[in-house]
Amino acid sequence: ITVPAKKLTRDLFDFPLIVTTAILLITGLIIIYDVTPLVSFNISGDRLFYFKNQLTWATLGTFALIALSFFDYRRLIKYGPALIVFSAVSLILVLIPHIGSEVNGARRWINIGPFSFQPSEFAKLSLILYCTSIISKFENFKIKLADAFLVIFIPTVIVAGLVFMGPDLGTALILMILMLAIYFVGNGPLLHFALILPAAISLIIPLIYLAPYRLNRVKSFLDPTSDPQGASYHISQILKSIVTGGFFGVGLGGSIGKFNFIPEIQTD
């Protein structure tokens, strides 16, 4: 059967998704260009340092998007088990001194020459592919909790636990949520969630209380004025920005927040 060219184009390319991605990419570049000249000049003498870095990765990402658009993403699912093993190994390596680089008390990066690799970010993609590959095998079978525990929950907990040791509780929670979302979409029995969620919450609460900075973040979330020069500092700056700029902001180049009022402004 000959498929009309118009229909073929519409089926092959998700134009709303492509346009949305392009808008987000361009907006991000504009923001990086606007807010980072001072910090870029302080660390490198080049006020466009962070912008050029972002532009480089945006270009590489665009070429990767184009190349992968000709690749059937469903073929990646079969590599899920291998990728999750690779993620676990890389998450172990990042914890080893002289292999993983420590920034602000956390080990999250592996430096390979001029490039940096963040295993926890790769673990998100690996976990999605792995859980999808496993849940697809249960499609025509009744999912038993014991089976799901062995082949889905335990691997996820291992990977999330390694991320948590970074320490990075936030990303570890994201990994757990990704797994639960895939399990839900894959028609995991609701009874399983009724058993898993209380257990997960009972584990997370002590982890928050064991680390003072985590507890302070929760307090800041509940009361943004609790520590305006400490844990609530970012929230205070956000409120000031909203009050100053209103709905439309102060315009490109008009913000004063970039003048050392926000730490790590290139990411925050």
Image: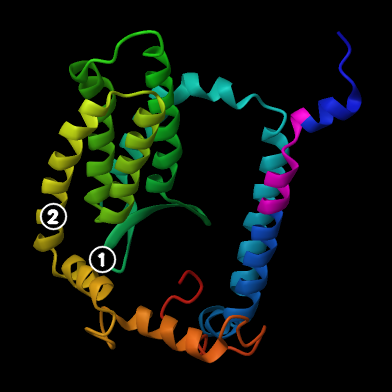
Disc 1 residue crowd, few under 14, some 14–19, many 20+, Cα 10 Å: few
Q: Earlier in the sequence, mark 1 or mark 2?
A: 1
Vertical position of residue 145 compared to residue 117: above or below: above
Q: Which element carries disc 2, helix, strand or loop?
A: helix
The answer to whether any part of residue 262 appears in the image is no
Find out whether residue 89 is within the magenta segment: no
User: Would you say the residues marked 1 and 2 are in contact, meaning their CB atoms lie under 8 Å apart?
Assistant: no
Looking at the figure, which quarter contains the C terminus?
bottom left
- Residue 39 % position (x, y): 52, 82
Helix, strand or loop for disc 1? loop
Task: Identify the residue at horizontal 43%, vertical 21% (top origin).
Answer: 133
Q: Which residue does the numbered mark 2 point to in the structure image? A: 205
Residue in the picture at 41% in, 80% down: 263
* Residues rendered magenta in the picture: 11-21
Q: Which quadrant, please, contains the N terminus?
A: top right
Q: Eyeballing the image, is 182 above or below 96? A: above
Q: Residues within 10 Å of mark 2 (few under 14, many from 20)?
A: few
What residue would you read off at disc 1? 105
Q: Residue at x 28, y 23 (%)?
A: 189
Report the side of 139 relative to 44 (left or right): left
Residue 116 is at least partly visible in this image: yes
Taking 238 as reference, is 245 left or right? right
